[in-house]
Image: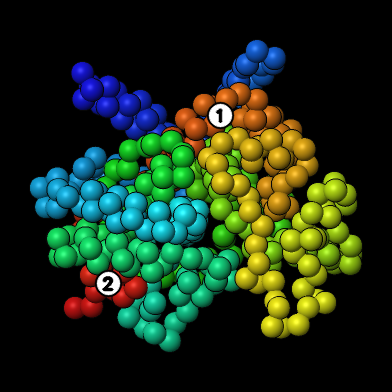
Amino acid sequence: MRSCISLWIVVALVVPVLLSLRSPRGETQTTLSFSDSSSSFSVNLANSFPFNQRIRDGSNLQYDFYRDTCPQAETIVRSALTRIYFDHRDVAPALLRLFFHDCFIQGCDASLLLDENNGDRNRSVEKQAVPNQTLRGFDKIDLIKSEVEQACPGVVSCADIIALAARDSVLLAGGPFYPVLTGRRDSHQSFYEEATDQIPRPDDNVTRTLHLFNLRGFNARETVSLLGGHNIGKIGCDFIQQRLYNFQGTGQADPSIPLDFLGQMRQNCPDSRNMSSSSSTLSSSVSSGAAFDTHYYQSLLRGRGLLFADQQLMAAEKTARLVSAYASDDGSTFRMDFARVMLKMSNLDVLTGQQGQVRLNCSLPVTS
């Protein structure tokens, strides 16, 4: 009976996502309906950007891909991450962010982990791009990879390890379970320029945020759901300095920030221009939350989003309605949507079959 229930959970989550992945991007319209005891509404969404011909849609991935070659792979990843988590609770948001930054640029191919580009140490790599310079968790992925390699040398890709570790991180942080298909291969090259230009920025407006996500096949609802991952972890003061002290070059704070909230943020993040280099705020941060719930959306409704890009979700009617919908129930709508879109994200532009390679060391490509 329990196995039947598990099977239905997998089917319920996987099938809608796989069907959405097969749909031409930028050509479909989706009507979203929400209702609760107090209100109901529908939103008509149209993807307005052209289909990206590069997309590898993940249709060649499998559930339990390593069942014959390394059946203990997922257990090793889960066990190793659980040990790490209970010593370092901040590993969950760190690996979730690592996963997102990897998948968003040329797909979930572990290109973010490389220390050299296609065997050339003189070429810049994604790690060096400004949006990635504050990422953490590389050492944790290396640790998990080493344990997997001891059991099954040269079998399990770094891309699969990131995807599995991100899912297990969400679960450990109190988020929803979602199945992760496996069989990804690792890229032999890194994409510095793309990471520099295409990773969403903390000061992006809502139009640019929706555009960047839409180019990768995510509609407004999926985008707002994914950004809900900001409900755990910490945000570095360097990400909000401009908003607090020199918004858009005015020398003033963002006028949309409530004064009491502005005071709280400034107390946590003093003006770096008035600080010595030894007391730089680059290592300082503000908590964005410790629970995987809807407080992120509730904060946006009150104008208390930490990042300008987050608060911008209230600047457009369609995204503001989605924020309101996620904030209005017990969190079940957000959790289900987040699980589905994380599964979709994990299948984005993957390398499979004979594409790419399986690295022995996640930071170095395999050379012949």
Q: Which residue is mark 1?
A: 331
Q: Position of residue 123 (x, y in %)?
A: 44, 82
Q: Amino acid at mark 1?
A: Gly
Task: Give the SS element for disc 2.
Answer: loop
The residue carrying pointer 2 sits among few (fewer than 14), some (14 to 19) or many (20 or more) residues within 10 Å by Cα, namely some
- Residue 364 vs 308, above or below: the answer is below
Q: Which mark is residue 361?
A: 2
The residue carrying pointer 1 sits among few (fewer than 14), some (14 to 19) or many (20 or more) residues within 10 Å by Cα, namely some
Residue closer to the observer: 172 or 56 = 172
Query: Residue 57 appears in which quarter of the rendering?
Result: top left
Query: Which residue reaches farthest bottom?
Result: 122
Asked if residue 315 can be seen in this view, the reply is no
Which residue shows up at 62% across the image and 17% down it?
35
Residue closer to the observer: 181 or 285 = 285
Which residue shows up at 27% across the image and 22% down it?
5
Q: Nearer the viewer, mark 1 or mark 2?
A: 1
Q: Where's the N terminus, which quadrant?
A: top left
Ranked by sequence position, the earlier of labels 1 and 2 is: 1
Q: Where's the C terminus, which quadrant?
A: bottom left
Which residue shows up at 14% across the image and 53% down it?
70
